[in-house]
Amino acid sequence: MQYQGVLRKMMTEIGDEVQYYLDMKTDFLNMNQLISKEIKLSFVTYECLNCHLEKKIYRQGYCQSCFFDIPQAADWIMRPELSKAHLDEEDRDLAYEKRVQLQPHIVYLANSSNVKVGVTRKQQVPTRWIDQGAHEAIEIVEVPNRYLAGITEVALKEHVADKTNWRKMLKNDIEDVNLVEWREKLKEYIPAEATEYFIESNIETNINFPVTQYPAKPKSLNLIKTPTYTGKLVGIKGQYLIFEDETVFNVRSNEGLVVNIQI
């Protein structure tokens, strides 16, 4: 079987075990069903996720001109504390910014390689945690806009990490922690503007990933430098495909690449 299409991050569905789906435009693959099968990945060309032109991808699946123009790639995406829609101030496209920024956001703790703080739109829970490869997570505050979530994250990351060690996450070199205790410990550092939104009582979410073999020394596949790769799929965690020879492929960081998948 052979499929071809532009890569976008895998869609996910939480359950006893996370289900992964890859949309290849004309085909829709349940990636869990491919575990234990040999897969051949081949780079074909580029396709910007915004303009859909065959242009080299710059960042986040976009060509360089789109990346510096469209609101989906503005600085406030990665740094929510820079959000200004609540002030009625435009960055690149005020209508888009209001639609995204002026909705409920969650500040959370997730444990993937270590305990980290993060921000996501409420509707992205638990998708965001799955994408990060977190095996447990918990909400800390639910605020009405992205700015409040951003300044809360900035305050809390003075006391807890805000990055995931992807190698440690993929090796499953992790330990279970009590995220309720972490939530209570960090409560005093929440900015005054967001204290009323603290979530007093909730429990952590546990996530199980479809992995039969974790890599001891994961090595990342770069399809641009190595245009063709063949390996046996042994698991999926976060947005990574894990192969038997300890090669790992981050689907999300390769968005915008047109690939051929042969099974």
Image (tube, grey):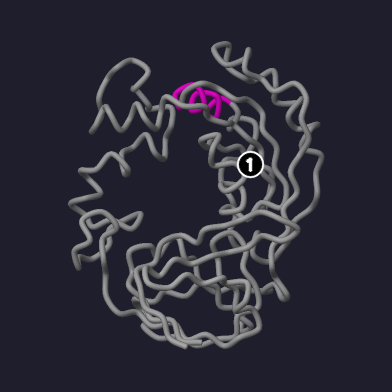
Viewer-nearest residue: 30 or 212 = 30
Viewer-nearest residue: 121 or 118 = 121
Q: Secondary structure at mark 1?
A: strand
Q: Is residue 103 magenta?
A: no
* Residue bearing the label numbered 1: 116
Viewer-nearest residue: 155 or 243 = 243
Quadrant housing residue 126:
top right
- What residue is drawn where x is 51% and y is 87%? 263
Query: What's the magenta bit mostly, secondary-structure-wise?
Result: helix
Where 122 sits versus 87, above or below? below
Tell me where the magenta segment starts and ends, as one range.
146-155
- What residue is drawn where x is 64% and y is 64%? 170
Q: Amino acid at mark 1?
A: Lys
Task: Give coordinates of residue 155: x percent, y percent.
Answer: 56, 25
- What residue is drawn where x is 59% and y is 59%? 238
Viewer-nearest residue: 41 or 246 = 41
Where 111 sits versus 229, above or below? above
Q: Is residue 151 magenta?
A: yes
Quadrant housing residue 35:
bottom right
Task: Give coordinates of residue 106: x percent, y percent.
Answer: 57, 31
